[in-house]
Image (spheres, rainbow, N blue to C red):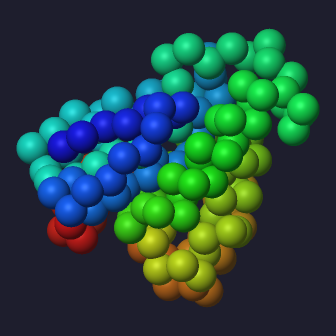
Amino acid sequence: MIEIKAPKRIVCCEESGYKIFLAGSIEMGKADNWQKRIVRELKKEPVLILNPRRDDWDSSWVQSIDNPQFRKQVEWELKALDIADIIVLCFDPTTKSPISLLELGLYANSGKLIVHCPEGFWRKGNVDIVCRKYKIPMMVSEQDLILTLKQRI
């Protein structure tokens, strides 16, 4: 397993296996660091993990196309989403996660998604309906998500 965190340069090779993007709730200070658990669970698998959760994120950055740090983050994420073979999309019930909802819409018809949306997420009904319509695997527990992910790789 190789992990690349934003905004590091994404380098892929045949030996890296499946490319997995960890989409979903990040809202620093609110969202659980579920990405860390996924990385730990996949440490022995032949995969390349593309992790947008930055160690050096600064919440004071203006979210504007004119802000180079912010723009670099968003462009990194868009590139990683495009090259990923699998997109793991987790919704944390303690967050609103508007960008995660955007990612669900952007990639709903891609065949790449595996979604984890537990009870309590404020738009779970919307997520459930989109997943049903586009036949996206929907996991209620993180354990089921990890099992499904391992089966796919």
Q: From the viewer's perspective, tell me whether residue 97 is left or right of residue 48.
A: right
Q: Position of residue 120 (x, y in %)?
A: 61, 46
Residue 71 placement: quadrant: top right
Q: Is residue 94 left or right of residue 37?
A: right
Please report the residue visible at 57 percent of the width from the left and 54 percent of the height from the top.
79
Residue 123 place in picture, x, y as percent: 72, 56
Residue 65, how many percent across, how many down? 87, 38
Q: What is the x, y in percent for residue 70? A: 75, 30
Residue 19, quarter of picture: bottom left
Q: Is residue 129 left or right of residue 68?
A: left
- Image point (47%, 80%), residue name: 111
Q: Say which quarter of the image contains residue 64.
A: top right
Q: Residue at x 24, y 40 (%)?
A: 2
Q: Nearer the viewer, residue 108 or 56?
A: 56
Quarter of the figure that contains the N terminus = top left
Seen in the picture, residue 19 relative to 112 is either above or below; the reply is above
Q: Does the rendering let one see residue 94?
A: no
Of 41 and 15, the residue lying toward us: 15
Quarter of the image with the C terminus is bottom left
* Residue 72 appears left or right of 148: right
Can residue 70 be seen here? The reply is yes
Task: In this rendered view, identify the residue nearer to me: 136 or 109.
Answer: 109
Q: Residue at x 38, y 37 (%)?
A: 4
Q: In the displayed image of the protein, which residue is found farthest to the left?
A: 44
Q: Does 137 sit above or below residue 29?
A: below
Q: How many marks?
A: 0
> Does 139 sit above or below residue 71?
below
Q: Which of the two residues, 120 or 5, is positioned nearer the viewer here? A: 5
